[in-house]
Structures are given as structure tokens and as C-alpha cells.
Amino acid sequence: MKMTMTRVVGTLVALTISIPAGAYSQERVGVATTVVGPVTITHVAASPAPLKFKDDVLLNDRVTTGDNGFARMLLGGKAIVTARERSIITITEVPGVSTIDLVSGRISVAVDKSRVRPGEVVEIKTPNAISGIRGTIVVAEVNGGVSTITVLRGLVDVYRRDPVTGNAVGRATPVGVRESVTVKAGVPPARPQPISADRAHKLAKDFTPPVRPVSPASTMPVADEVTRATDLIGTLTGGTPAAGVGTPVTGGAPATTSTKATTTSTLAPTTMLTPTTTLTPLPTISTVPTTPIVPKVVQPPLTAPILPGNTLLR
């Protein structure tokens, strides 16, 4: 009996050791809100599978978009990550830091500052650059060993990434609104260069879904996250565009205000009809014979000064 128990314990220990370390950290970090074209997701120790609308995105997942592929994900209710065609990204997270690791391709990241807690940060990593963002809209591209970081809103500090440790090294390069910086392996980031408003607008449009996805109504809990995603998506598609891109969100406010003003001015003239004294000339018509009209037209406070007491008796 003792030998049997020893074997059982030994088997359990062996099974525990054989489980990949990443299997314990496969927690849900986001949800797919838009999927167009060929897009796959690879969980830890699993084969690639098609990514579908409302699918969960787990920690350490790898998302790959094929030709004409397009994917948008809401991460932690605070950031929207949009990947264009031929892109590969991995989602990782440690306490206080959510990381989108861009291996190749193009992505945009829009962070809602109001949902980021103090001390939290969302960062974009490319093979040779690291960018920390808070309440910012950033487009990152990796092409031929060169990383390009473009800021559509906010301010981002860009660092060179050490290829061995994967950590940020050197001094930060601040990149402001409508500025772009390139980073090559082994050298600090180049001097940021301004981009035109037209270029910024084109970048924003590039990350709009190529076709409108069919998303049937659902009462599942994910619907709340999709709603939040829709609010955030406005930052890239014109609802709250980047500075200098499209129409500011404040442009829509006067429409509501003017509607209320028009309604008020239309109803205001009704108060002009309320005074009954403007209709008092009616009692002077002596041809009115019927007494039932008297209580309707001649009100008690007005009969004394206007008509003698025996007017209707003559």
C-alpha cells in the first residue's frame, strides 16, 4: 500500500512538472471586437486557431493577421489594439504593465486615460524600441528591421530596446502630437519628425475596418466590453479623432444645444395667449342672448368694471 501511494504521488509530481509554465498564466486579458479576413490566435502550448468575433484573448496569446486580415481587440477595458494585415503581436502583462509586443506589421494603440489606474502603463514593444503610453493614440510599424513610432495624440517616450535583455536602454526620446520617430537596431532613436495633418488623417483611416463586421446583438457579458470598445474606437474613426485629424468631438455638441434652443423658442409664443384680458371685447356684443355664455366669457373679477348690473336684463 505504501509503495502504491508513493507511485501515485510520484506520478502527480511528474505531471505537475510537465505542465508548461505559461499554462498557469493563461488568464483572460481582452476580447476580439472586430475580425475581418484571415486572423489566427495561438494560445500557449496550442496550435493556431481562427480568431472570431467575441473570442477571448488570453495572456501570452499571439495574434497573426494574414493578407487582407484586420483585427481589433479591447484589452482590460482601457486600450484598443488594432492590427492591420500581415502583423504579428503578442499580449503580455505583469503587475502595472500591459505590453503589446509587435513582431512585424502595423498596429495602432488607443489608450483611454480615464480607465488607467495610477501607476499603470500600457507599452508597445518592437524588436528595437519600447514606447510607454498613457491616454495616447500611437501607430507602430515594423518593416525590415526598422521601427517607426507615430503619435496622433498625447506624448510618448521612446527608448531603444536591448536585443539581449529586452529592456529599455539609453535616454528617452519624447515624441509629441503628429510626430514620428524611427528606431534602428543598436542606435538611439532618430530625431522626431513632424507629419502633416493629411498624413495623420490617412493613418487614422488606415485603422478603420475595411468592411463593417456583422455583429449580432448579444446579452452576453462581453457586450459591455464591446460597448466600451465602440466608445474607444471613436478615437480612431472620428468620434474623438486625434488632434488635427478629422472633426473634433466638440463639433457635435452644438447640434444638441441648438435643437433644444429651437424647441424652446417655438413654444415660447404660447405664453402670449395666456392673458384673458385681451379677449374681453367679446362682452360688448349685445347680440349675445344666451346666459350660458356669461360664465365662459365674462369672468367675475371683470364684470363689475365693464358691464352694468342690468345690461343683460334689458
Image (cartoon, helix red, strand yellow):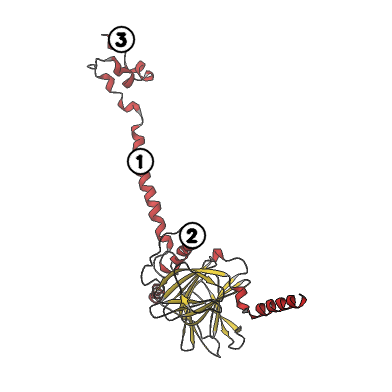
Q: Quadrant of the N terminus?
A: bottom right
Amino acid identity at mark 3: Asn
**Image disc number at residue 214:** none
CA gap, disc 1 to disc 3? 42 Å
Q: Quadrant of the C terminus?
A: top left
Location of residue 195 by image quarter: bottom left
Judge left or right: residue 234 versus residue 169.
Answer: left
Of the pair 125 and 222, the residue shown nearer to us: 222
Secondary structure type for disc 2: loop
CA gap, disc 3 to disc 2? 80 Å
Q: Which residue is mark 2?
A: 220
What x and y, as percent, mark residue 152?
A: 46, 73
Residue farthest to the bottom, as pictured: 186
Residue at 48% x, 70% y: name it. Answer: 73
Q: Which residue is mark 3?
A: 310
| 10 Å crowding of disc 2: few (<14), some (14-19), many (20+) | few
Of the pair 189 and 81, the residue shown nearer to us: 81
Closer mark to the observer between disc 1 and disc 3: 1
N-terminal-most mark, 1 or 2: 2
Residue farthest to the front, as pictured: 1
Q: Which residue is mark 1?
A: 267
Secondary structure type for disc 3: loop
What x and y, as percent, mark residue 251?
A: 40, 60
